[in-house]
Amino acid sequence: MERQTAATRELSRRVYPERDAVLIEATHAQRRRQAAATEAAALHRARAERASRKGQVADGVIGRAAKASQLGRTA
């Protein structure tokens, strides 16, 4: 059965050689699109995490300044 399948595929390649090239190019294009989408998602997550960390730092600085001003008022 495997020999039959291999022979059929070989005959198909001989009859439709451009089909293989088209399928290969389509597969490569799909992989490039998937890689670009994955990269874009990773950049988006990284930027969101960075913005979140900067926001936490800013909140911490503002929080400390507010506490210090409250301490100065009560003292």
Image (cartoon, rainbow, N blue to C red):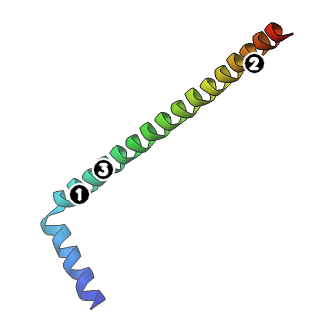
* Residue carrying label 3: 30
- Choose mark 3 or mark 2, whichever is in front: 2
Q: Nearer the N terminus, badge 3 or badge 2?
A: 3
- Choose mark 1 or mark 3, whichever is in front: 3
> Label 3 vs label 2: CA separation?
51 Å
Q: Quadrant of residue 67?
A: top right
Q: Nearer the N terminus, badge 1 or badge 3?
A: 1
> Label 1 vs label 3: CA separation?
10 Å
- Choose mark 1 or mark 2, whichever is in front: 2
> Identity of the amino acid at label 2?
Arg
* Picture layout, residue 5 above or below residue 69: below
Quadrant containing the C terminus is: top right
* Residue carrying label 2: 64
Q: Secondary structure at mark 3?
A: helix
Residue 23: image tag:
1
Badge 2 crowding class, 10 Å Cα cut-off, few under 14, some 14 to 19, many 20 or more, is: few
Residue at x-position 17% and y-position 59%: 19
49 or 1, which is in the foreground?
Answer: 49
Q: Secondary structure at mark 2?
A: helix
Looking at the image, the residue that sits furthest to the left is 15
Residue at x-position 56% and y-position 27%: 51
> Identity of the amino acid at label 1?
Leu
- 13 lies left or right of 60: left
Badge 3 crowding class, 10 Å Cα cut-off, few under 14, some 14 to 19, many 20 or more, is: few
> Identity of the amino acid at label 3?
Gln
Q: Nearer the N terminus, badge 1 or badge 2?
A: 1
* Picture layout, residue 47 above or below residue 74: below
* Picture layout, residue 22 above or below residue 63: below
26 or 13, which is in the foreground?
Answer: 26
Q: Position of residue 3 (x, y in %)?
A: 28, 87
Quadrant containing the N terminus is: bottom left
